[in-house]
Image (cartoon, rainbow, N blue to C red):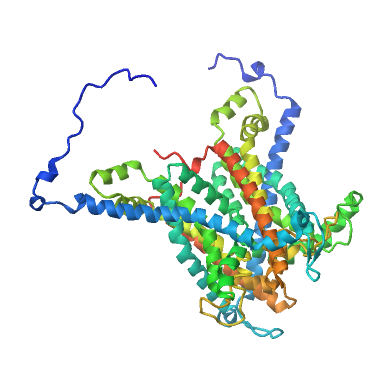
Amino acid sequence: MSETAPGKSVVPPVSLRRRVTDHVMTGLAILTVFLVLTPLVAIFGYLVYRGVGSLSWNFLTQIPKPVGEEGGGMANAIVGSVMILGIASIIGVPFGIGAGIYLAEFGRNRLGSVIRFTADVLNGVPSIVIGIVGYAIVVLYQHHFSALAGGVALAIMMVPTICRTTEEMLLLVPQALREAAYGLGVPRWRTTLSIVLRTATSGVITGVMLAFARIAGETAPLLFTTLGNQFWNLRYDQPTAALPLQIYVYANSPYEDWHRQAWAGSFILILLIVSSIAAVRYVVRRGSFGAA
Amino acid sequence: MATPAFPRPDMPGPQPVATANVNSDAVQRTPLLRTSGGERSDRIFQSAITACGFAVLGVLVLIVYELVSRSGLSWHAFGFKFFASSDWDPVNEQFGALPFIYGTLVSSLVALIIAVPLSVGVAVFTTEMCPKQLRSPLSFFVELLAAIPSVIYGLWAFFVLVPLLSGYVQPFLSKTFGWTGLFSGPPYGIGMLAAGIILAIMIIPIISSIAREVLQVVPQHQREAVLALGATRWEMIRVGVLRNARAGIVGGIILGLGRALGETMAVTMVIGNRPEIAKSLFAPGHTMASVLATEFSEATGDTYLSALIEIGLALFLVTIIVNALARLLVWTVTRGQPARGHV
């Protein structure tokens, strides 16, 4: 080592132009990071600032006051959102997990590839188009807007996401586990449900929660399926208030008090979404089997 | 086909197990070995699971069927002229989708022009430059942007971004670049430019996370080889990394475009919702998604509704094509990493 000539004399020095370009490019890359993080910080900061300031007990417990009156809250919208998301999950989760199991365990063929590609493509369908479909297949038959229609539309959005994450998670389960189960004479359905799915539980839950977080804030598919409601409604076949819808309506209104409530509603919504993502990260960390 | 090199010796095949001869009552069977029951439940299970798989296909077919059948009225009335006419007059039942197509294309284009350099920059920084400890929190924060609902972006854009634009950015732009004609007219804040900017913020996480994925699969020895030739870090990134990841990055950009084309709520809240074609980015506009959001529930008359659904169908077809293209491009680079490699 010590005998060799010092690097300077062997390697020609890097020209000034190239060194400057290198530094400029590094600087530009750092600048882009700041430019991207600025709106994130601005949105979250402003949301917390306006949201916490507008939050009150009345907001969480009362229904909207008539136009022009101060006060009132979004209690019915919060309950309505929970209802719609519940309906969507009841329909979407089993189908999504089932389709994921199909792709992972039986889908090593052409049909599997077609379904996989379809799921990916469905993931990219604009949510407003899904709303039209919800309108066409539920509202037109029921003859009025309903929580069910919104739930169906959101379920359609959940299925492809859950399907693909479930597949990914099941594929991570070692093949040896399946073979061990077959070797003991366990039938295939038992192997899939009690060995493979069981092993991948935390990963599958991650996928479900991510799909949930994605649909929780969706507004466009609800516009002409659940329509919104200024009063309490707990029936699945009636127009229902939903948090994102109420935010949209209030933001477009000319009243300062409603704007405040829109911010408070957004704060509650983002709290719901961030906490479900945090739950995902917690599950992934704790479980032996996470998103890889 | 050639004959096998080593012909198998004549071996007795598997002999039928003589279960039939044994008195079945005398055999003690453990539950696990009861194959007949297992086979039946296996068949039931497999058909249930396959049905779930077909449900995914069914949903796509259902979407296509509903959109096509319910837009028939408008298709028969206007034909191809629907996409070439800029006449949107619900009162006289004259419908042309050109202003919406124009609005969708222009707002998405503005979004791409802003978002592409930023997201590629972030991806390059996180994979090639930043210290290891910073890498995962940074990508987490960028992906947090993707978790914010569209309506909250719209709310923020309406109350924060639009006043900023009309107060500072637009006067500056019209003074400096007013001669191009792109930045002229009264600075309302609301309009194409605001929609493009908020769309850019929304698609940055998508493009940058895909670009990051693609950069990560560029083999390490490519970087080492370029560095060994005496390249600086930027030259290594340009020659060794970006050039190899080109197709995948383009795929990510197209995926972002797909999202921008169909984005509804945030755009509806800031674009101004007027079916006009104007050269200036300051002017209000309308997109295919925003006209659906604002007019669908108030549409009176079958032709009106059918025209709106036809816009939905066009939007659906465009995003399907864009997404399929993007998936193929990303797949060619990452070789379908997420969902292959089984055994």
Q: Quadrant of residue B232?
A: top right
Residue A253 seen in render: yes
Q: Residue furthest top?
A: A3
The structure residue drawn at horizontal position 46% and vertical position 57%, both measured from the top left corner, is A96
Q: Where residue B278 appears, x then y in whole percent?
A: 85, 57
Q: Is residue B288 left or right of residue B280?
A: left
Residue farthest to the right, as pictured: B179
Q: Considering only vertical position in the picture, is B227 above or below B189?
A: above
- Residue B49 position within the rendered picture, expressed as x and y whole percent measured from the top left: 40, 54
A244 lies left or right of A160:
right
In the drawing, does residue A56 fall left or right of residue B83? left
Give residue B331's quadrant in the image. Answer: top right
Where is residue B8 shown, x and y percent of the image? 25, 22
Q: Position of residue B193 (x, y in %)?
A: 79, 56
The front one of B70 and A156 is B70
Residue nearer the viewer, A16 or A166: A166
- On screen, residue B189 above or below A5: below
For image coordinates 51% across by 79% down, the residue present is A234
Work out whether B41 lies above or below B304.
above
